[in-house]
Every structure is written in C-alpha cells, then in structure tokens.
Image: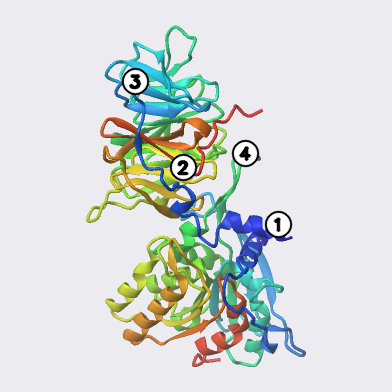
Amino acid sequence: MRKRWVVLALAAAAVPARGADEYQFGPDSRPQEGVPRGVVHELSWRTSRIYPGTERAYWVYVPAAYRASRPAALMVFQDGWSYANPEGQFRAAVVLDNLIHRKEMPVTIAVFVNPGSVPPAEPDQKPRGNRSYEYDALGDRYARFLLEEILPEVGKRWRLTADPAGRAVVGISSGGICAFTVAWERPDQFGKVLSHIGSFVNIRGGHAYPGLIRKTERKPIRVFLQGGRGDLDNLHGSWPLANQEMAAALAFMGYDHRLEMGDGGHNGRHGGAILPDALRWLWRDYPR
Amino acid sequence: MIALALLALLAQNLRGDEALSKVLADGEPWRPAGEGSGAPGALCGDGAGGIFLADPGRGTIHRVGADGRPALFARGAPRIGALALGPDGRLYAAGPGQILAIARDAKAPEVLAEGVRAHALAVTRRGFVFFTDPEEGRVMVLAPQGRARVAASGLAGPGGLALSPDHGTLAVAERGGAHVWAFRVETSGELTAGMPWMDLRPPTGRTEGGGAGMAVDEEGRWYVGSPLGVQMFDGQGRMGGVIGPPPGGAPAAIAFAGPDRAYLYALAGGKLYRRRTKTRGAPPLPPPS
C-alpha cells in the first residue's frame, strides 16, 4: 500500500514560503523509559461500496492497557500513515503510549486511515487518487464510510465505546476539514475534532462552514484547530483566515473550542509539536 | 529523496495551485475561428495541429490544418452531432441513429452501430467507443466488431465525455445534474469505480450544472462546457476555475486543437471560437503494443 507518498507529499509541502516553522518535539513525542508500547496492526480495505473500486491501507493502534472487558475510546486519523509514522511529523502512536500510560487521556484505540485510490486497469496507466473526493466534500459520505465500512471491521476484533464524547476525528489539511465534516454530520457518533491546518476553504465548498455554524443549533462537538500564519493563500482561499473564521463562528455559537495559530506553513511541524497538549485539552474531562 | 518528494507533491498538489493562471494566457481572449468551414455543429482535434469540423446542415466535414486553411474532408455525410479521433486514425462520428467511422481515403463511412442515440463520443486506444445517451441517463460502449451495450446508467442527462491522457479514466458531465462522473475504463470496455467526482458550478439559483462537451489537457486537467463558460478541474477532481464563455454564449462542445494542440476551441451559439492557452490538449494515443 502506498503510505510513502502521503508522507513525502506532506514533507515536500513543508517548504515554507513564509513562517518560522521552527517547532521541536517535546518529551511526550519521544519513546520514554518504562512506558509500555501499544501494537500497530496494518490492514487494508479493498471492497468499499461507498467509494467503489478504491483501495487503501489503514492501521489500528491498540494500547498496552487495552482490555476487551472495557470498551476503549476511539480516535480516527485521516491521512493515517502521516500520523502513525514513527519518523513523521506527528508520531501519534508514541504520544498515545505516553499519555495513556500517565492517564492524561483514556485508554484509546487509534485507527489511522489512508485516503483511497483507484488502481489503474492497465500497468502503464496511473491510479486515480481519491483523497479530495473523500476529504474535501461536505455531506455525510465519508462519515458513512467510517461508520459502515471501516469501524465495523475494527469492531470485530476490538471493543470501542459508543459514547460520542469518547470518539474523536483528526486530520490535516483536507483531512482537517474532513474530520470536522464527520463530526458535524454525525455528532451522535463523534464529539471531538482535532484539525491541523484544516482546509476550510473553497476546494469543494468547505468555506461555507463558518456561515453554517453561525446559523445552526449548536452541536455537542469539541473542536481544536491548529493553524499557521504562513499557511496557504491560493485559488481555494486563505487557510489562516479560514481557520480564524472558523474559530470566530465557533466562539459566536458558544462551542468548546480552541484555535492555536502559529507562524508555520502548510505542514505538520507545529501540529506535531503540540499534539500532546492538544490531546490533553481534548480529553481533559473524559473518564480514564 | 527530494526529487521523489517533489514528485509526490506534484502528484498530490497539496499546495492546490492548479489555478486558471496556469492555463489562461494574458492577451489571449476568445477569437472567432473556422471561417470557410461552414456552420460547424461538431469538432475534434486531428492530432496534427489542425481540427475537424462537421457542418450538419450541409453534410460536410472540413479539416482545418495548422496553417488555418480549411480543406474538405468528406461530403454527403449525414447530420453529424459529434466527432472523435480514433486510434486507427479514422474520424468517429455520431450521425442520426448511427455511429460511423470515416477514413480519409475511404469511399463511404463504415457504419459501426445502428439504432443508437449518441450525444457525444470518445474512442479509447483499444478502439472502444463510449457515447452518451442523455435521455436514458446512460453511457453506452461499442466494442470493436461488437454491439452497443450499457456501460453505466443512472446519470442525470449525461452530455459530454472525455478520456484521461492515458485512457484509464472516463469522465462524463451531467446536463441535468451537478456532477461530472469519473469511471475506470477496464480492458473489457466495462466501466467500474464510478463516482460523482467533480462538482459543477450551476448558474446562480439553479441546481443543474448544465455540463456539456468536455476536453482534457496533457496535464490531466478536465474541461467542461457549461452555461457559465468552461469549468476546469484538476487531476484530483477539484475545481480550478471557470473560464468565461465566448461571445456566442454557453459552449456546447469544446476541444483542444490547432498548432501544438494549444488552442481551446468552443462551439457556442452555432459559431466557432478559440483561444490560445498555456497548456496543450492530451495527445491522441496509438493502440497499445
């Protein structure tokens, strides 16, 4: 499965035109003595009905403290390998090991899902990348993909909580707006959103969210937005302004939310450096 | 490592900079084209710096060369509604209830299918002819030496269609809907992995996108004629922008043709226009080896 292209694409996008981007990992992003490590299982999904013909890899992180007798909290990460890669900008499994061990967040199973692609019919043809169609589109299609296809499969082997406050969605760039869309469409299933440099711009109409948020009864969603003042400004919109618009709309409607604006560009360096803090904030009042 | 990273970046285009500025050239607006080739109703590039134009009223097909001079290619043709170049160098055409293949040196066109309704057509390097049947909401396929059969159904008034540069993907625009569908083209001619992949921008206050004729450039960008002009999408199905319509109105059929295949041609209001672009149409593909 093609995990490398996702990492390389994000790494290459990390050539900042502006912005400091000088973020460092803290100790919670590094393996620590005496902290038991979870297991990461690599799986694939090739039989989607909602995205017919697509194939994708996904990984399931099961913490050392998981017990089948107690349903675990859940975090679904889009662009899965970018988060799971132990040498990437996020190193999420390491962070989860550390925070779960110290009970700074509940025992959580993480599902790292890569975007799909349609393999070519003939060897000299190119695959059709499905990331934008899956991540940038509004509506409940991707939420249904998680709820009807991926999560039931995960649920065959591991027990997940049904409490939406115990289920979070995470993503970067188009994955960020995707995460928000999943919770927006299905707050009965997901009550926590973590977005990194989220693409709340007009790729496929996502710039409508601030207006929708302001004129929709508040949903039970907690939202952490990480943005960068050096982020993109292009044909789709201005990422820094879009994230600020999102925060202003969430504030207006009284959402439990936080916006962390740094000086970084369109990459995961800032998000990765503050991932432990973001997770602590997101899970701060959830029973351990 | 850096080269791979850059390649991956370009492939994913996370910077999202497939803007109109990459395609439209300063000082190159729509200009009238095709003088001397009749009243064109269908067009397609000839793969050699020129363009084929069919005049349904007069029953003629002209080939306008790279030098801009029209030469009669065929006469006595039935009312041609659509043209496409095939991998065998023949000109494929949609006539009334028929699909034809016209070779330059042949006495008469070969009738490939009868009793069919084809609004637009595209021919793959393996010789499969895909065509749209808007009234029935279907995409049909005609295999070489075969009969027409349904390849996809349930589309909202499928109009124009186009193949990706490697003929691995077929895109079909909806006239009565708001999407352009993308399918994988199997070696059998079946269409699989169909998804409503690109969002057309409908005129304000309407829900139908009015998607008409399509074209593809060598970068894999998709172009769709519509009431708002020519809507351009990148290889991930994201809209790059809407190119304004020519003076004649909404483009009904479009094609990359002319010298270097760098001109975007459009039929609008019964008249032909073209504008020079910074890109080039996808080149015709020979049959696979």
Which residue extends farthest front?
B27
Q: Which residue, given by chain and number where applicable, does mark 4 sit on? A: A122
Please name the residue that numbered disc 1 is placed on. B3
Give the amino acid at mark 1: Ala
Residue at the spot x=44%, y=6% of the render?
A: B107
Q: How far apart are labels 1 and 3 at the CA level?
A: 49 Å
Task: In the rendered view, tell whether residue B19 sits above or below residue A206.
Answer: above
Earlier sequence position, callout 1 versus callout 3:
1
Q: Is residue B284 above or below residue A223?
A: above
Mark 4, residues whose alpha carbon is within 10 Å: few (<14), some, or many (≥20)?
some
Question: Regarding mark 2 in the picture, which secondary structure is present there?
Answer: loop
Which colour assignment does the render follow?
Answer: rainbow
Q: Which residue is mark 2?
A: B277
**How far is mark 4 from mark 1, CA to CA?**
25 Å
Please tell me whether mark 3 sits on a helix, a strand or a loop: loop
Circle nearer the N terminus (2, 1):
1
The count of marks equals 4
Residue type at mark 2?
Thr
Assess disc 3: are there few (<14), some (14-19) or many (≥20) residues with their C-alpha within 10 Å of its C-alpha: few
Which disc is residue B36 wearing?
3
